[in-house]
Amino acid sequence: MAQHSETIVVTGAAGFIGSHVAAAFLARGARVIGVDNFDPYYERSIKEANLARVREGVAKTRLGEPCHQEPFTCVEMDICDESGMDGLFIRERPAGVVHLAAKAGVRPSVADPVGYVRVNLLGTASVLRAAERVGCARFVMASSSSVYGNNTKTPFAEDDPVERPISPYASTKRSCELIAHTHHHLTGMPTACLRFFTVYGPGQRPDLAIATFMRLMRDGQPITMFGDGSMSRDYTYIDDIVRGVLAAYDRIDQFGYRVWNLGSDKPVRLDALIAQIGEVTGIEPRVERGEAPAGDVEITWADVSRSRAELGYAPKMARHEGLRLQWKALSGG
Ligand SMILES: NC(=O)c1ccc[n+]([C@@H]2O[C@H](COP(=O)([O-])OP(=O)(O)OC[C@H]3O[C@@H](n4cnc5c(N)ncnc54)[C@H](O)[C@@H]3O)[C@@H](O)[C@H]2O)c1
């Protein structure tokens, strides 16, 4: 079992999921070293605000505790900088790693496959090597539902075929799972690959559909519905994902190498999602139609039986309430 007070490196800590994961580890007493290069994919100010929220949380939960070491720091560093990563790990001697840093968007990966391969593959290999140098006892990394490609058997289970990803992003995520497997085979480092299904909630990455729709609707702008509205996504609330990440971190030593789906097992069609956002915001969506982008899959749908049985994972958030919380954070309402 992981010690709650141990030091953990969280890569991508300034991002959407990383900042929530860092906050959760800090809340249970860990020391967290974040690593992030503030990739310009979206504005730095949003990532600075994420970090400020994490620091505020620490200030509240650790008020009055004696502080020998800063509980949270975020180092600005590119995960592809091998010597920088080695130096950081040797200095900090973390017990474990949650590796979330990546080039994360599906659509931009179609135009920049080289950039995605560089960061996602070289970066992951560099973080794994640094972890191995200091003998980290746990390694948890973000994979993605996109590895299932356009599989027609639903819901998607971890042992389904994943040889046909349809975007450069998805192939880098599947490749990272393979690199991590090889690394585990050679070093024995307990390693979990978590296939996240589209994550939403307060602070959602601004390029993703719900955040984009809510922002445009708030500003009185039309929104674009790609395709005929039948594309479906298994949206998963951030707090459910964070609980899954912590459970995987705590239990991976019992499994060696393991892949787990973290989804909600409740896919929704795009047209139904837009209608629901309309209900939650009280704003009638003005919908324009656009062509479905290359690289987007038809459906994602998580079979969560394995994560339920092995991690005690139980997604709780009802979509209507999750959307309401995301809208409240965005609109200040
Ligand atoms: N959000 C989702 O729905 C979703 C779904 C499936 C998988 N994932 C995966 O989860 C992880 C986190 O996603 P997110 O939505 O929080 O994205 P995000 O973009 O908000 O966070 C990723 C962070 O990684 C940092 N980063 C990028 N390249 C880096 C580099 N070379 N060195 C150091 N830091 C770097 C970015 O600056 C960013 O802060 C990613 O690995 C992503 O692929 C996310």
Image (cartoon, rainbow, N blue to C red):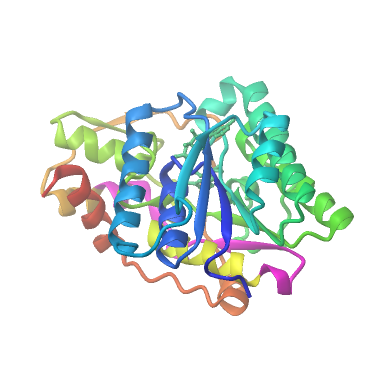
Read off the magenta span. 252-274
Q: Is residue 142 above or below residue 74?
A: below
- Residue 201: % across, % down: 33, 52
- Residue 160: % across, % down: 70, 60
Task: Report the residue at 73% width, 45% height from top.
Answer: 128
Q: Nearer the viewer, residue 152 or 104?
A: 104
Q: Is residue 272 above or below residue 44?
A: below
**Which quarter of the rendering shows the N terminus?**
bottom right
- Residue 298: % across, % down: 52, 45
Q: Nearer the viewer, residue 83 or 240?
A: 83
Quadrant hosting residue 306: bottom right
Task: Report the residue at 54% width, 78% height from top.
Answer: 312
Quadrant hosting residue 83: top right
Magenta stretch: residue 144 in it? no
Do we see residue 13 in this rendering?
Answer: yes
Magenta stretch: residue 256 in it? yes
User: How many badges with numbers are in the image?
Assistant: 0
Do we see residue 225 in this rendering?
Answer: no
Q: Nearer the viewer, residue 128 or 215?
A: 128
Task: Report the residue at 63% width, 45% height from top.
Answer: 149
Q: Is residue 99 above or below residue 115?
A: below
Task: Report the residue at 15% width, 43% height from top.
Answer: 331
